[in-house]
Image: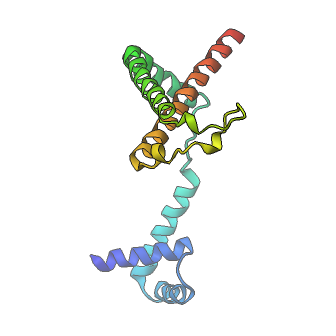
């Protein structure tokens, strides 16, 4: 049985043209000299030709994409996030971070030594020592996270404004 399978595999390689040149010459010699190889080869060539002549590949209909999209539209689609996220919670979190940032700014202003100013009446920012405020690694990481969150909030606000502008234009 395994010889029959091996013979078929070698013949298919020969018929498909993927056999190596030395293998092709061996298979041609076996087809010419052995009756079993010749019969199997003729049977496989007939099958190969029959498949090429009568097998047609089916193409999808012209409305295939539209049909798929209509089926998807019939399914229950998850609601938009605005319907299941409580906006009061989002505003509360934003208020917390804004309060924290304002607190940091007030703390920084309170740490300024106002008596070190020059007598010219102008305020010199380069004479302020910020190292007491921003030398802690935790404070630096916290400030970076707050800046990123603030930028994300600003991006979300601009995206909402852009959607509103598109609605008004159409």
Q: Is residue 53 left or right of residue 94?
A: right
Residue 122's place in the image compared with 142, above or below, is: above
Residue closest to the eye, 126 or 85? 126
Residue pictured at 41% horizontal, 15% vertical: 87
Residue pictured at 49% horizontal, 42% vertical: 144
Q: Quadrant of residue 126?
A: top right
In percent of width and height, residue 17 lies at 57, 74
Residue closest to the eye, 47 or 151? 151
Residue 54's place in the image compared with 149, above or below, is: below
Q: Is residue 36 left or right of residue 22?
A: left
**If the image is split into quadrants, where does the C terminus sit?**
top right
**If the image is split into quadrants, where does the N terminus sit?**
bottom left
Residue pictured at 39% horizontal, 78% vertical: 7
Is residue 24 visible in this depiction of the protein?
Answer: yes
Residue closest to the eye, 90 or 100? 100
Residue closest to the eye, 112 or 95? 112
Query: Furthest-left residue in view?
Result: 1
């Amino acid at each position: 049985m395994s010889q029959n399978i091996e013979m078929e595999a070698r013949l298919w390689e020969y018929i498909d043209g993927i056999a190596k040149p030395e293998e092709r010459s061996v298979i041609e010699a076996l087809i010419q000299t052995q009756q079993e190889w010749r019969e199997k080869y003729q049977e496989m060539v007939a099958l190969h030709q029959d498949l090429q002549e009568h097998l047609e590949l089916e193409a999808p209909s012209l409305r295939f994409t539209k049909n798929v999209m209509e089926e998807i539209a019939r399914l229950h689609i998850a609601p938009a996030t605005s319907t299941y996220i409580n906006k009061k919670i989002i505003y509360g979190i934003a208020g917390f971070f804004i309060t924290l940032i304002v607190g940091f700014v007030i703390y920084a202003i309170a740490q300024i030594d106002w008596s070190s100013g020059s007598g010219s009446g102008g305020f010199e920012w380069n004479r302020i020592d910020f190292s007491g405020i921003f030398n802690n690694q935790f404070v630096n990481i916290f400030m970076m996270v707050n800046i990123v969150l603030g930028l994300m909030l600003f991006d979300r606000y601009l995206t909402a404004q852009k959607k509103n502008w598109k609605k008004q234009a159409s």
